[in-house]
Amino acid sequence: MTTVDIHDIARSARTFDLGGFYVITPLKSQRQLVQRVVRHWVEGKGAGYNPDRKAALSLVKVEESMEGTVGDISKQWGREVKLVATGARFQREAIGYRQLKEVLSERSQPFLLFFGTGWGLTEEVIRNSDYILAPIEGSHYNHLSVRSAAAIILDRLLGRG
Amino acid sequence: MTTVDIHDIARSARTFDLGGFYVITPLKSQRQLVQRVVRHWVEGKGAGYNPDRKAALSLVKVEESMEGTVGDISKQWGREVKLVATGARFQREAIGYRQLKEVLSERSQPFLLFFGTGWGLTEEVIRNSDYILAPIEGSHYNHLSVRSAAAIILDRLLGRG
């Protein structure tokens, strides 16, 4: 997780009106880094300098684990959270974009979309997900940055394009 | 133009099978920076270390001006280049995504899509364009990074989602 990831994905999350953007990492130093970045733009000097960035970064929350994140969201909504794994490799039983868009539009439950950086999501996350989203099929090249992949996936699921 | 912009947009360009990704800047120091980055990944140490990145960055060309870029493309294709301006603000007579996707699918001419960083495209570029693409309409927030905007626009115009 880099600071560019945080800024870009927060800006995409705000564009498509998400309820939050959770950065999940077991590493304390990483969580502290993210919290520093967020504080700078939400409460610190950055907030006055760039209110648009404040609007985006105020969506960011930092969590240690997937369990903690799911607990936070289900408490907030008072409902069970549905988990959606994303990734560049095709998995058996993947759900397509139109199909998931329809499910989301019912707005009956909160959904948590997982994006992995570096080597992608762990097997555990994939196993525990309710849905596995189909990869973005471009040409035969499937090496988008996580920032670009998140932007495209949010647009396909929530955009009006 | 940052090195993250170069990497991300090159990876998106390769994903959607573009013919090239031109970085246009009148600043010599910026052109040299981009050329150094590209050389590292296409010919230098990066090429062996990460062939996927090489495949993306080999699409990058560096130009001093819009005129030089248009000239390079029309020479390569032997046809007139159609210019498409993009941006976050709505312009009169903007073309929609489905309509432009249809035009592109005819594949009768090369198209050059312009993305601006920082303060967006200049009035001159907008005036000289054949088409002005409608902005990405999410919620009322229109502050995507140029990397995310490029990814979404390429997906809408060329993706199979």
Image (cartoon, coloured by chain):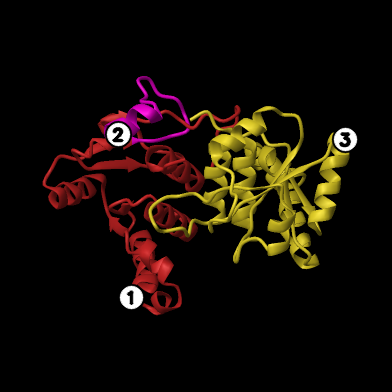
Chain colours: A yellow, B red
Left or right of A136 on screen, residue B17 = left
What amino acid does circle 3 point to? Gly
Task: Please give the residue where the numbered disc 3 appears in the rendered image.
Answer: A78
Left or right of A31 on screen, residue A7 = left
Q: Quadrant of residue A104?
A: top right
Residue sitting at the far left = B78
Q: Position of residue A76 (x, y in %)?
A: 85, 37
Q: Residue at x 60, y 50 (%)?
A: A93
What amino acid does circle 1 point to? Glu
> Distance between the Cα atoms at labels 2 and 1?
35 Å
> Distance between the Cα atoms at labels 2 and 3?
53 Å
Q: Quadrant of residue B158?
A: top left
Q: Is residue B94 magenta?
A: yes
Q: Secondary structure at mark 1?
A: loop
Q: Are marks 1 and 3 on the same chain?
A: no
Task: Please give the residue where the numbered disc 1 appears in the rendered image.
Answer: B43
Q: Which label's residue is closer to the chain start, 2 or 1?
A: 1
Q: Residue at x 39, y 71 (%)?
A: B41
Please report, as a chain letter, where disc 3 is located. Answer: A
The crowding category of the residue bearing disc 3, from other C-alpha atoms within 10 Å (few below 14, some 14 to 19, many at least 20), is: few
Which mark is nearer the camera, 2 or 3?
A: 3
The crowding category of the residue bearing disc 1, from other C-alpha atoms within 10 Å (few below 14, some 14 to 19, many at least 20), is: few
What is the magenta range?
A: B85-103
Please report, as a chain letter, where disc 2 is located. Answer: B
Q: Is residue B76 above or below residue B143?
A: below
Q: Secondary structure at mark 2?
A: helix
Q: Which mark is residue B124?
A: 2
> Distance between the Cα atoms at labels 1 and 3?
55 Å
Q: Secondary structure at mark 3?
A: loop
